[in-house]
Amino acid sequence: MSRTNPQISSFEPALFASQGYIVRKGLITRPVVESLNVATERALTPLIGPVEFEAEVGYPGAPATLDASGGNTPRRLLHAYARDSVFADLATARVIKETLAAVMGREDVYLSQNHHNCVMTKHPGYSSSTSWHQDIRYWSFDRAELVSIWCALGNESRENGALSVIPGSHLEEVERGRLDRDLFLRTDLEENQSLLNRRVQVELDAGDVLFFHCRLFHAAGRNESDTVKFSAVFTYHDSDNHPIPGTRSDRYPSIPLV
Ligand SMILES: O=C(O)CCC(=O)C(=O)O
């Protein structure tokens, strides 16, 4: 896979360590982004499973049932790695591997098939918002040290429901009482306001890739634009960080990046 900006700067791993994320602009070339968009459109009409529907996410604003208006809007095309080689090529691309190795500080990088591994398809009209959370909350590994990529397949802004992040939040210990029943950060608590006040909107252009730590608090709004937003999202760990046997994190084997 060719690239426009292959070299990771020497300061980027340190930036990732301190703020829990970096954005690499223009990492994925236009032709590759185009082929990812084509494959995504092809998977939507007719709809190719497995898919997670808006009614199944249970987020604020999501329709209550599949039968409700908009309930069967596809929110995630699941098993992206297996569904089309263009997604597998992205997930295992050399530019992705090189950046992951740099921010993780090691070369033995593995793609998890069990987490993210999807194309987010945030539709206008029926998209729900995602409250503040750490991805690790439902994952089971030896250590909370995984990194995800979020590859924008079009522009991402506040209007179409782009991610916001809280820089440095991956380093903070947040007591259980500061999270709600579903482990989302409680926005009603005074003690969470200083964290929330540090929020930053992440705006992306097609081909930009956000790398973010699994403990980084992040959230996203609804898609208020009139165009569907596509983002390819994958998660990685190193060979010493094993999924806990018998959990969802261990369902399918991880794929080594060469
Ligand atoms: O696009 C969104 O609503 C955010 C999704 C998200 O943060 C997640 O799946 O972990």
Image (cartoon, helix red, strand yellow):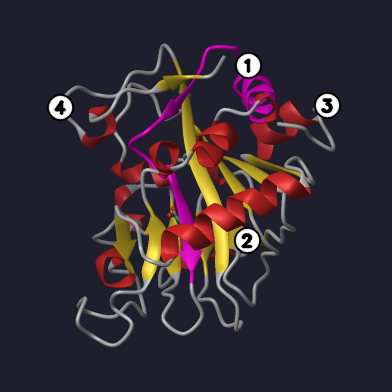
Q: Which of disc 1 and disc 3 is earlier in sequence? A: 3
How far apart are the alpha carbons under marks 2 and 4? 36 Å
User: Is residue 223 depicted above or below 9 in this figure?
Assistant: below
User: Is residue 81 depicted above or below 150 in this figure?
Assistant: above
Say whether residue 216 is visible: no
Where is mark 2, residue-wise? 199
Judged left or right of residue 98, residue 36 is left
- The quadrant of the rendering that contains the C terminus is top right
Q: Which of disc 1 and disc 4 is earlier in sequence? A: 1
| Residue contact between numbered discs 4 and 1, judged by CB atoms under 8 Å | no
Residue span colored magenta: 96-122
Which residue is located at x 29 percent, y 44 percent? Answer: 138
Say if the magenta span includes residue 200: no
Kindly identify which numbered label has been placed on residue 7.
3
Residue 155 x/y as whole percent: 70, 64
Label 3, ligand 1: CB separation under 8 Å: no
Which residue is located at x 36 percent, y 80 percent? Answer: 61
Spot the residue most to the bottom. 69
Q: Is mark 1 on a helix, strand or loop?
A: loop
Q: What element carries label 2?
A: loop
Amino acid bearing label 2: Arg
Where is mark 1, residue-wise? 105
Q: Is mark 4 on a helix, strand or loop?
A: loop
Q: Which of disc 4 and disc 2 is earlier in sequence? A: 2
Amino acid bearing label 4: Gly
Residue 169 x/y as whole percent: 55, 46
How far apart are the alpha carbons under marks 3 and 1? 16 Å
Amino acid bearing label 3: Gln
Kindly identify which numbered label has been placed on residue 246.
4
In the image, 152 versus 192, the foreground residue is: 152
